[in-house]
Image (cartoon, helix red, strand yellow):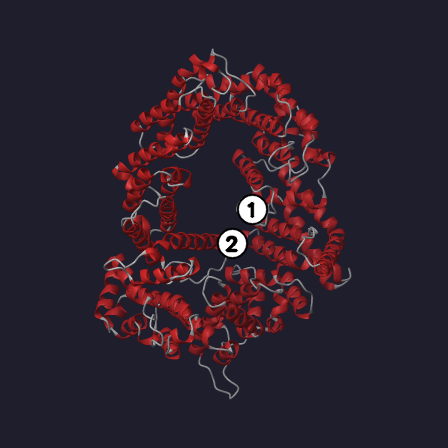
């Protein structure tokens, strides 16, 4: 046994020595570099033997777990990667390695360590066993010769089965697409083994539930085919299995509550039943009656269990039952009862929020199922016959959906009405209305793309989103119906936001005071429907006349508030929401090409109210955030030339706080000559510096204001220099002086420096970067800020001249020195930013010596190796996706990391072209540099760099 490796294990597990961890990972990653190496004789398996045989290691739980994690990394990354190599470069002894992992998993008492080793066993089964399902069957149930499997071996086999399903479902594990698809299909076809173990329940029932739950999730994640299609034997066996009998028993009893794992399994089973056959009918006829019994107590768990099970069943099976079963069939009648129970839950005031969330989740999922699919346009590359076949399939599916929708319309209309009634009488607090407003704002940011999220933590948001979906599927409730639900007009805004016509009718019919109660909903909703607005291209928008009508309604309301000093009476937040909605309309109609001169005069009440909010001395009403909200709205109007500040406003502004001065001086210069001088420009920069300091301490509105100010001063500087009103040299000198006083504001400075004439930019931008990094603490600048200041927008001008390019390259090498920032989660993005910069400087600065270029490349590769070593044990390639929820966000994050890796390798591959120019390698050069020197193209270079 390598004593140095043992010592490294102890140093890391006892003291957290990261250098020891990197040393071990380096040994493990390169332990199979020589083809034919016996895998079981390498460092990771040897450490595992030591941890099981050495008494001191056994007493250290942390050492055992660490060694198990190292072996998982070795097996799931190193071994699998090398099995993808040509035959002469593959390792040997894998059967012996598999036997070692099986033995170790049996001997290990620690659950966490055993889980890591079980993944190793499963991974080797997947790549070594051509008949994976048969091998697992014989292990779980015994072979055909009547060999009896012990309970311990059966439990072990079931754990391996779960790990195999998790690994096959996790595309991050490098199994190989053909092998993965083959083994997955084979395991799906024989998945009934998950229900046919020799264990008889009792103390093992929890394990059996977990195995069945993993199997159902495995089927739900199937990439091709519906769960019932790809695992027919599993579904046939499920209704009579001990696990399912246990689940029905748990559902039927009122106490104790149904365990969460059982409830998850039942709901996932029901979500798989999209086709009605004998097994599916049996499952539904047992599960639904178990929860449709009268609720014996007001316990929250009873309501929640009922709502989750019914919602899961309706989500998947409704379309098939409605279109295939006659109305007098038992299953049809059962689903009718379940649907009535859901409506009853919506109508019952006592229904707890958790149950409401699940009801809404089920109804929302059902609306997605029933939504007809759009018929795509034929592309020039499409085969006409294939395209016609696809269109016919879509039309047939849509016809089925329409049929189902017509039969379900009474039920769905009852749901829509119940949801509207509940919303009308909800008595939402401001925070809950704001939650709905934030949701609509996000939908606009996503350009009203299809929203697949059907589950929401907040019951109020779940109610609203479900109501919105039903309104779009069925059509909105009429104004008369909504009015009957609540005669208070100010309670109706939440209900009419789902439809442009309803919203317009409501706005035209209400008094100014009516707008205030739910005013927080106005800005995003108006933006959604106004002509030329963000959402108007995706939803039914108001016409030009209707948009102007809405603007007039809002402006009349603002005039009323100003005349009656409503904003001074404590309703300032609501009044400003109405003002923000008016600003949204003004901006939208201007963007749509409408002549803003026609509405400029009518905007007087809006401007007056905003200016009053900015300059009011009533601090108890117009606090900092309130005042600043008005400032940003006024800035928007100023920037667009809708209004102009008079000269008389300047004295009032000079007395205002820094935030107000910075924003309004930046915006006012567009329409007021006295605010458009170099002196005011310099003063605005000083205000910007103070504002940036506030933004650093308290992220939020200051950051938004800082962006507005920067946008304003950049536009002003560029405009004046383009027409020759300001001297580029004088502006450059002004910016240099300003940045000397505020060197931390490098990004602001660089954006301003980009406005001066091209010949002045390289030295000006370089000076700013050097000033910024001359501050000692900026060695630790965040990766996001580092990437921002090294953007190609700034690197390209600096690299355009020889002296500045050489200085930038020297700065780059300084930034590539070892630093803790390279070994944290976003270290890969840091390397990417520096690699991009280095590659671009090398391409654009031929005057750099070859030794300098290679030195920078070696440093950048070293930092990349440090990052990959530091994150190897927790990275996607080593971490099996055994999470129960398998959330989509996690998958997105993995894709982002994969993109970062690919981008880093692409940049380094281009940069490493310099290796081909070397006539001889530097002293102590790594071996991979010679491989880069011989590589024929960037693809080969990327392969070399990838396998470092």
Does residue 882 appear left or right of residue 40 in this picture? right
Give the residue furthest to the bottom.
145
Residue 70 coordinates in the image, percent (x, y): 33, 66
Q: Is residue 948 visible?
A: no
Does residue 326 appear left or right of residue 656 in this picture? right
Give the residue furthest to the front.
919
Q: Looking at the picture, does residue 856 appear above or below residue 942? A: above
Q: Looking at the picture, does residue 243 appear above or below residue 299? A: below
Q: Quadrant of residue 701?
A: top left
Query: Do the residues bearing badges 1 and 2 touch, measured as CB atoms within 8 Å?
Result: no
Q: Which residue is mark 1?
A: 353
Q: Secondary structure at mark 2?
A: helix
| Label of residue 468 in the image | none
Q: Which residue occupies the foreground of this view, 535 or 757? A: 757
Q: Which residue is mark 2?
A: 888
Distance CA(mark 1)–CA(mark 2): 25 Å
């Amino acid at each position: 046994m390598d004593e140095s490796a043992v010592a490294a294990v102890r140093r890391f597990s006892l003291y957290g020595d990261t250098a020891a961890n990197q040393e071990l990972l380096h040994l493990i990653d390169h332990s199979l570099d020589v083809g034919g190496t016996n895998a079981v004789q390498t460092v990771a398996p040897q450490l595992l033997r030591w941890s099981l045989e050495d008494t001191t290691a056994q007493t250290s739980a942390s050492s055992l777990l660490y060694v198990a994690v190292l072996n998982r990394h070795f097996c799931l990354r190193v071994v699998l990667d090398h099995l993808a190599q040509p035959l002469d470069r593959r390792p040997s002894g894998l059967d012996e390695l598999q036997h070692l992992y099986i033995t170790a998993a049996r001997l290990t008492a620690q659950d966490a360590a055993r889980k890591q080793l079980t993944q190793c066993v499963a991974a080797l089964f997947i790549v070594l066993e051509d008949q994976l399902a048969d091998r697992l069957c014989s292990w779980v149930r015994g072979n055909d010769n009547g060999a009896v499997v012990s309970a311990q071996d059966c439990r072990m086999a079931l754990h391996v089965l779960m790990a195999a399903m998790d690994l096959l479902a996790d595309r991050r594990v490098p199994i190989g697409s053909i092998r993965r698809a083959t083994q997955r299909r084979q395991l799906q076809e024989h998945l009934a083994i998950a229900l046919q173990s020799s264990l008889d329940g009792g103390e093992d029932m929890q394990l059996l539930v977990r195995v069945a739950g993993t199997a159902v999730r495995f089927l739900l994640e199937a990439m091709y085919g519906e769960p019932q299609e790809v695992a027919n034997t599993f579904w046939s066996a499920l209704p009579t299995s001990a696990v399912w009998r246990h689940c029905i028993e748990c559902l039927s009893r009122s106490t104790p509550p149904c365990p969460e794992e059982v409830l998850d399994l039942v709901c996932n089973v029901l979500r798989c039943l999209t086709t009605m056959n004998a097994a599916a009918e049996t499952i539904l006829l047992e599960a639904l009656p178990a929860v449709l019994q009268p609720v014996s107590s007001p316990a929250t768990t009873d309501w929640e269990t009922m709502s989750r099970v019914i919602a899961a069943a309706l989500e998947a099976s409704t379309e098939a039952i409605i279109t295939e079963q006659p109305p007098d069939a038992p299953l049809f009648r059962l689903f009718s009862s379940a649907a009535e129970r859901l409506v009853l839950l919506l109508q019952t005031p006592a229904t707890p929020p958790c149950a409401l969330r699940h009801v809404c989740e089920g109804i929302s999922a059902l609306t997605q199922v029933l939504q007809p699919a759009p018929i795509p346009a034929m592309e020039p590359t499409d085969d006409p016959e294939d395209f016609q076949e696809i269109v016919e399939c879509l039309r047939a599916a849509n016809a089925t959906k329409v049929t189902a929708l017509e039969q379900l319309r009474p039920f769905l209309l009852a749901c829509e009405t119940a949801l509207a009634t509940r919303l009308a009488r909800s008595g939402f607090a401001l925070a809950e209305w704001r939650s709905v407003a934030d949701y609509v704002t996000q939908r606009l940011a996503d350009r009203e793309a299809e929203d697949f999220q059907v589950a929401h933590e907040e019951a109020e948001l779940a109610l609203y989103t479900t109501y919105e979906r039903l309104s779009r599927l069925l059509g909105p409730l009429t104004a008369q119906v909504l009015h009957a639900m609540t005669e208070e007009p100010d309670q109706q805004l939440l209900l009419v936001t789902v439809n442009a016509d309803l919203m317009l009718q409501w706005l035209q019919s209400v008094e100014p005071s009516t707008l205030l109660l739910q005013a927080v909903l106005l800005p995003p909703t108006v933006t959604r429907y106004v002509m030329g607005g963000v959402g108007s291209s995706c939803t039914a928008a108001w016409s030009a006349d209707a948009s102007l009508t809405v603007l007039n309604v809002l402006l009349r309301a603002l005039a009323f508030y100003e005349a009656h000093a409503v904003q001074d009476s404590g309703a300032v937040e609501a009044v400003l929401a109405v003002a923000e909605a008016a600003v949204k309309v003004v901006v939208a109609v201007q963007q749509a090409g409408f002549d803003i001169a026609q509405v400029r005069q009518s905007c007087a009440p809006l401007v007056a109210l905003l200016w009053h909010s900015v300059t009011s001395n009533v601090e108890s009403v117009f606090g900092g955030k309130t005042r600043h909200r008005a400032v940003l709205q006024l800035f928007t109007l100023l920037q667009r030339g809708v209004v102009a500040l008079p000269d008389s406003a300047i004295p009032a502004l000079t007395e205002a706080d820094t935030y107000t001065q910075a924003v309004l001086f930046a915006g006012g210069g567009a329409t007021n000559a006295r605010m458009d001088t170099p002196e005011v420009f310099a003063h605005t920069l000083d205000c910007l510096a103070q504002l940036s300091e506030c933004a650093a301490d308290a992220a939020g509105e200051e950051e938004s204001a800082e962006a507005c100010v920067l946008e304003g001063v950049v536009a002003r500087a560029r405009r004046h220099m383009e027409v020759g009103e300001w001297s580029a040299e004088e502006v450059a000198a002004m910016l240099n002086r300003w940045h000397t006083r505020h060197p931390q504001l490098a990004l602001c400075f660089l954006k301003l420096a980009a406005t001066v004439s091209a010949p002045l930019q390289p030295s000006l931008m370089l000076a700013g970067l050097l000033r910024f990094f001359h501050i000692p603490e900026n060695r630790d600048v965040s990766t996001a800020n580092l990437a921002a200041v090294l953007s190609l927008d700034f690197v390209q001008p600096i690299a355009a001249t020889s002296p500045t390019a050489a200085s930038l390259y020297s700065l780059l090498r300084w930034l590539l020195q070892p630093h803790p920032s390279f070994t944290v989660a976003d270290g890969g993005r840091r390397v990417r930013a520096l690699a991009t910069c280095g590659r671009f400087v090398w391409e654009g600065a031929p005057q750099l010596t070859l030794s300098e270029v290679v030195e920078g490349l070696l440093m950048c590769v070293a930092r990349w190796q440090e990052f990959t070593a530091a994150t190897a044990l927790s990275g996607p390639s080593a971490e099996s996706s055994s999470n129960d929820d398998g959330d989509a966000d996690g998958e997105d994050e993995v894709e982002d990391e994969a993109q970062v890796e690919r981008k880093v390798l692409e940049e380094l591959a281009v940069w490493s072209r310099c290796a081909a120019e070397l006539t001889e390698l530097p002293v102590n050069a790594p071996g991979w540099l010679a491989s880069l020197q011989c590589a024929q193209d960037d693809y080969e270079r990327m392969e070399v760099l990838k396998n470092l």
